Amino acid sequence: MFRREKNDFFSIGGQVNNSSSQSEETLERAITAIKKFEMNTLAAPLYWYQTEREEGVYDFGQIDFILKKARENQLKVVFLWFGTWKNGASHYVPEWVRADGKRFPWVKNAVGATTRILSPIGRETMEADGRAVAKVLAYIKEQNRDDTVLAFQIENEPGLLGAPRDYGRESEEIFCSEIPEDMKKFLQSLKDGELFKIWKENGSLLDAPWKKTFGLMAEEIFSAYCLASYVENVAAAGKKVYDLPLYVNVWVRETRSRIPGIDYPSGGATSLVLDLWKYFAPHIDCLCPDIYFDDRDTYQMVCSRYSREDNVLYIPESHADEKNALHIFEAVEKHMLAGVHCFAIDSTIDNDGNLKPECEQFRHTVKILASMKPLLEKYQGTGKIYAVVQQEWMESMFFDFGDFWGHVYFLNSITDEPYIHLDCSHDDEEHVKVRGKGLIVYTGNGEFFLAGDGFKLVLIRKDNMEFITSSLRGFKYLNARNQAYKVVEEGEFNQEGDFVPKKVRCGDESDMGLWVYYDVGLVHAVLEM
């Protein structure tokens, strides 16, 4: 999704706390944290109430100081528009919007109580939001000649939290009417998916009201139609003035009891209605899941649902913790992750500016991704990227690279001490006991790049079985000491995209396999073919 100077850009970023970008002073702590991680992107909210305190009068001072701080620290920027909705509510709208409920209607719940959520059928609200976004993007276009700004988020986790739909009079009339023509065309275009299944189970009707057409999930699907149409109008107004990548982040439904309006905002671009959002919001380039799950299965399941031919996987919010530090690598390999940001970056450091201990492994992952960044941008989706993740109780992993078999040994599980053999700076418990994680890129013709923590790779050339089964290949100690390396070196990519060696490995430092730790950068190895 991200482009810089017409090339792909793998964004590794930190999103500030909700109200931390209201001034240069409050932003400073977030910048400090981002620099501690050595990330490349700052994600910062822009508040509608601060941008347009008086209707039609715009103040872009917030944009100015965010760009100033980013440029001072060589960071890219993703702006987040806190407009009509933020986390299923409407907390960041201007006072003149909040004060006029007739012009800018609020959602009513099923018992008639007025919520603090602006209704997605409020046309004047939609038009006012669209005008503001157009003005903001026009200003960003003027200020972005150096490509500092990568993308722009429309709203923040839009949806209705507290009601499955708007039960106000006008909304009720629409809900009880026959589904509109554009919805009929959408349904007829479907061939599979969750929403298609719900429609089929309820009789595949095209001439009925929403409830009869979709049954139990009608309220959420109705809200999704209203929200996607609303957001599309706002996005179209922005795209008209500046064709910057636009995305919507999603509070996903794969949580708790999966009750819309209770466990997640109803109508957001959840997996249930993802097809609907893609159809009705074509000016949104990407629908992006915020992923806070600790367990691997749910994390990867959500990634799989948002990684599609028509939707790039980008994770705009996640935890800066050890679990996310592991899960990201599989998302890169299996789901072609294009970028990842962690939320509340300014909460990852203490009041003295020190990184909190629970964030240390995520810092390692950031460094590993940063080392691999040019390779990720070049080889994503080619099948040349392999994730190394030490799941619970795992001692090793096997890979088939085509020309080679690869055996990854996790250092914390190796029992024969001499086989660990790293270098004098890493040959201690701190570096050996870390949980294994990282990436391997095999470009072909015997060339490998590795970056990670706590593992080493031993290769077996797939030439002939007689040689493979000989002691030189079959016995790991002899195989590791008889690798046909042309070169093994540590280094990094420069700004021009060329690999620059910093240290050559030979003898003891390469005899026992290609080992990694986050602080050595990239390990580059070329073997004879």
Image: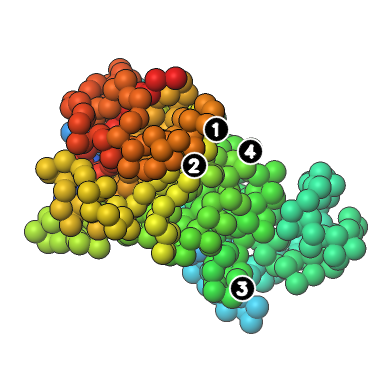
Q: Please give the label number shown on residue 465.
A: 1
User: N-terminal of the two: label 4 or label 3?
Assistant: 3
Camera-near label (3 vs 2) is 2
Q: Report x, y in % for residue 400.
A: 52, 38
Residue matched to label 3:
259
Local packing at callout 3 (Cα closer than 10 Å; few below 14, some 14-19, many 20+) is: some
Camera-near label (1 vs 2) is 1
Q: Amino acid at mark 1?
A: Met
Local packing at callout 1 (Cα closer than 10 Å; few below 14, some 14-19, many 20+) is: few
Task: Tell me the element at label 3.
Answer: loop
Task: Tell me the element at label 4.
Answer: loop
Residue matched to label 4:
310
Marks 3 and 2: CB-CB under 8 Å? no
User: N-terminal of the two: label 1 or label 3?
Assistant: 3
218 displayed left or right of 93: right
Mark-to-mark CA distance, 4 and 3: 27 Å
Camera-near label (2 vs 4) is 2
Camera-near label (1 vs 3) is 1
Q: Amino acid at mark 2?
A: Phe
User: N-terminal of the two: label 3 or label 2?
Assistant: 3
Q: Residue furthest left?
A: 352
Eyeballing the image, is 514 above or below 364? above
Marks 4 and 3: CB-CB under 8 Å? no
Residue matched to label 2:
399
Local packing at callout 4 (Cα closer than 10 Å; few below 14, some 14-19, many 20+) is: few
Q: Report x, y in % for residue 284.
A: 57, 40
Q: Does any portion of residue 250 appear in the rendered image?
A: no
Task: Tell me the element at label 1.
Answer: helix
